[in-house]
Each structure stands twice: as structure tokens, then as C-alpha cells.
Amino acid sequence: MKRLLLAAVLAAAASAHAGEVLLHTVSMHGKRTYDLTSTTNVVDEKGNVLSSVDTTEARPYNNVNLGVGYRFDNEAVVGVYHNSYRKAAFYAGYMPMWQTSHAPLSLGFAVLVATGYEIPTGNKITAAATLIAGYKVASETRIYVSHIPKVTSDTVSVTHIMFGREF
């Protein structure tokens, strides 16, 4: 239902005025796996916990992060994609881009809040920032490469590719 509602909002926004539809594609992570810890409780017949066992397993990151977004003329951005932890991630934020002296190339960043990252952060909503390079491949079509660097020992770097189509 959330995806359908977001798709309707994006479609309405695209038809209402100029902007850019973003198509999320693939990512590459700085390491292959992440650790997922789960807890198993041993309970008695009354439901009382007798003991708990934590199990940690290495799971591969999802590198196919398909999704759709919309970048408004005021540089606000919203969207949804299938994230690295195989969860739906809804995001909103700000994505300014600046044209370089080399006409097809633009550089910028995004500051976002997103859902779907409870596994690494423990939070329902996570803030993130990413560096972005855009390259115009056709009159109204761009390819974007974004990169989030590793900032602490418990984070991982990720590079993501998306396409944009201006309206």
C-alpha cells in the first residue's frame, strides 16, 4: 500500500510540473557481507524465558537496489527502493547539483532521511549524506553515481548508480 501511494504521488508530481524521475539500479559495497544477529529464546510451558542464545551469521549485501524517486525543481527528493538489507527504503531529502565547466558533468550531494535501515542502525529512521556525480547522456537523461564513504569502523562504503529523466 505504501509503495502504491508513493507511486501515485510521484506520478502526480511528474505530471504537475517539471522535475526529474530517478530510477535506482545497482550498488557496490566496500565489503561483501554484513553480520546479522538473531536471538533464540528457550521457554517453558508457561512462556517464561529459561535461556537465550544469540546467533550471528554473515549475509551478503543486496546489490540490486531497484526503485524510483522524484527530484523536484526546488531540489527536494523523495523515493523508494529495495535496499542493501533487502528491505523497502523510503527516503526524502535535498539533492542540489551544480553544473561544472565540462557541460555534461554535474556534481552535488544529497542529505536524506530513510526508513528500512533497522539492521545496521537499530533506528526506524536513519540520516545519510552522499556525494553525487551526474553525467548527461542524452538531452534530458542523466546517469548518476553516488558514493557514501565509510565513516566509522561499523559502517561500510557504498557506491550506487541511478538514472534520471527530466520533464
Image (cartoon, rainbow, N blue to C red):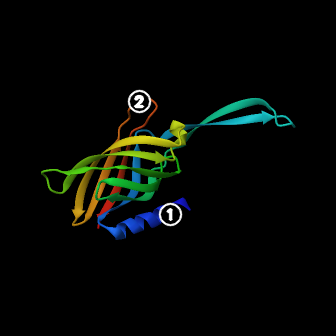
Classify mark 2: residues with Cα within 10 Å, few (<14), some (14-19) or many (20+): few
Residue bearing the label numbered 2: 152
Determine the secondary structure under disc 1. Answer: helix
The residue mark sitting in front, 1 or 2, is 1
- Which image quarter holds the C terminus? bottom left
**From this viewpoint, which residue is outermost toward the right?**
45
Q: Quadrant of residue 15?
A: bottom left
Q: Position of residue 128 (x, y in %)?
A: 40, 41
- Amino acid, disc 2: Thr
Q: Position of residue 164 (x, y in %)?
A: 31, 60
Residue in the picture at 35% in, 69% down: 16
Q: Is residue 161 left or right of residue 97?
A: right
Q: Is residue 133 left or right of residue 67?
A: left
Determine the secondary structure under disc 2. Answer: loop
User: In terms of depth relative to the viewer, which is nearer, 65 or 60?
Assistant: 65
- Which image quarter holds the N terminus? bottom right
Q: Position of residue 6 (x, y in %)?
A: 47, 61
User: In terms of depth relative to the viewer, which is nearer, 55 or 13?
Assistant: 13
Mark 1 vs 2, N-terminal side = 1
Residue bearing the label numbered 1: 5
State the mark number for residue 151: none
**From this viewpoint, which residue is outermost toward the left?**
101
Residue in the picture at 38% in, 35% down: 150
